[in-house]
Image (cartoon, rainbow, N blue to C red):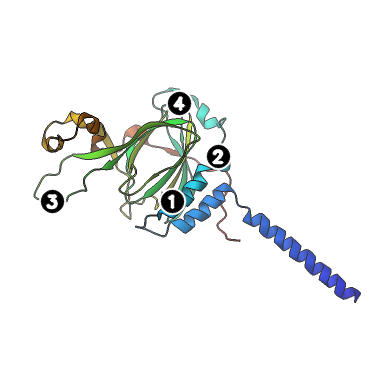
Amino acid sequence: MVERRRTEGVGRVRRDIEKKKCKKMTKRSSLQRLFVACRDVFKGLGTVPEPTDVTKLCHILDNMRPEDVGLSKDIQFFKDKRAAKGIPKVTYATVYKCEEFSLCIFFLPPRAVIPLHNHPGMTVFSKLLLGSMHIKSYDWVDPVVSDSSSRPSKLRLARLKADSVFTAPCNTSVLYPTSGGNIHAFTAITPCAVLDVLGPPYSKEDGRDCSYYKDFPYTAFSNGEAMTRKEEDDEEEERYGWLEEVEMPEDSKMDGIEYLGPQITDTIC
């Protein structure tokens, strides 16, 4: 009888310990919850997240703080004396990457620039964790027309999506393969850190290489295609621009550093 009671007691203790362990495992960090949500949302190449999934990811990202990825305003990178010479360099750290999505943090000292670039076939969530930055973004007005009988123009018309200063904390911005400002540029006003979720990530092998652009005011060209759009008034004209694809700017190359913040666990409780 005594032995049975001892056995039952041990069983209850073990069950209590297992419950406590499970509770600890289910209490996920913000970064872990973001990872699990991304794993559920990004279903593979060529898919765009459903509106409900976009809302779910935005809710997690909107509530994330610099501390959730191991950052603070006193981070030494922002005090680099080299930033005083010329255009300061952008640095990035890859938090996680797989075929379906990637999580990456970009560090921009004051005056640092990520020039106009695109995200072919990608959905991107950008969360400004620290600082103030100017963001300018465009979407193509017309689809690319493949016509071997005519010489393609170097300029393409694009609609201005954003041209504003954003300061943390602020809501997450979302761009889609053909909308939301797929072509964008960042200019840091103060030291900045941006957490990007890309689904799927860049891949030259899969045709998702990064292209760079130079933009011109809509009114800079008064002939050709621009003449066919003269029905637009002056206010509307300011919402358009001409983009020309250029080689990757020499001063836009980034340095990769090791991610040293909270780690992601690729397991399910």
For disc 4, the marked residue is 83
For disc 1, the marked residue is 54
On residue 65, the disc is 2
- Which sits earlier in the primary sequence, circle 1 or circle 4? 1
Residue sitting at the far left: 149
- x and y, in percent, of residue 253 in the image: 38, 37
Q: Residue at x 52, y 50 (%)?
A: 34
Going by the numbered disc 4, the residue's amino acid type is Ala
Q: In front: mark 1 or mark 3?
A: 1
- x and y, in percent, of residue 39 in the image: 48, 57
On residue 147, the disc is 3
Q: Residue at x 16, y 31 (%)?
A: 221
Q: Secondary structure at mark 2?
A: loop
Query: Label 4 near label 1: C-beta < 8 Å?
Result: no
- Which sits earlier in the primary sequence, circle 1 or circle 3? 1
Q: In front: mark 3 or mark 4?
A: 3
Q: Nearer the viewer, residue 188 or 140?
A: 140
- x and y, in percent, of residue 50 in the image: 40, 55
- Quote the CA–CA distance across marks 4 and 2: 25 Å
Going by the numbered disc 2, the residue's amino acid type is Arg
